[in-house]
Image: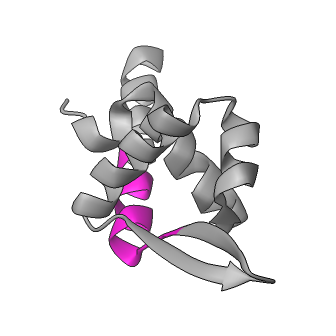
Amino acid sequence: MDFDKLVHQPTRLQIFAYLYQHGETSFPDLKEALDVTEGNLASHIGKMEDADCVVVEKQFVDRKPQTTYELTDLGREKFEEHIGTLEALIDDLDG
C-alpha cells in the first residue's frame, strides 16, 4: 500500500483536510487553525502549489495584503485518494 508523500506528510495532511472541509481560507485563519509558524505554513503551501494541488491568491483588501488558499480539483482528488487508501488499510486490519 503506497501513500502519496505529498499528502501523507502530517502538516500537509492537516492543510489538505482543513482546506477540503472549509474551502477558501486566508493565511491567518489557516495558520491559527493548524497552530504552525508562518515559515512552516509557507513552505508546505509552496510544495502543494508546485504540485498544482492548491491555488494561492494574493490581493489587497482595504490597502492590506490578503493571501487565500483553496484546493484545486487535483488537490481534492489526491486528498480523497489518500483517504481511500487509509480506509482500505483499516478494512484490511479488520479482516
Q: Between residue 53 and residue 69, name the one nearer to us.
A: 69
Q: How is the image coloured?
A: one colour
- Locate residue 70 relative to residue 93 in the image: left or right: right
Q: Can residue 4 be seen?
A: no
Residue 89 is situated, as x and y percent measured from the top left of the image, at 37, 27
Tell me where the magenta segment starts and ends, as one range. 70-82
Looking at the rendered structure, the number of numbered marks drawn on it comes to: 0
Residue 74 is situated, as x and y percent measured from the top left of the image, at 33, 70
Q: Residue furthest right?
A: 62
Name the residue located 43 percent from the left edge and 73 percent from the top edge: 55
Q: Is residue 47 above or below residue 88?
A: below
Prevailing secondary structure class for the magenta stretch in the rendered image: helix
Quadrant of the snapshot with the C terminus: top left
Name the residue located 19 percent from the left edge and 29 percent from the top edge: 1
Name the residue located 36 percent from the left edge and 30 percent from the top edge: 9
Q: Residue furthest front?
A: 63
Q: Can residue 32 be seen?
A: yes
Residue 59 is situated, as x and y percent measured from the top left of the image, at 59, 82
Name the residue located 45 percent from the left edge and 27 percent from the top edge: 10
Residue 75 belongs to the span the image colors magenta? yes
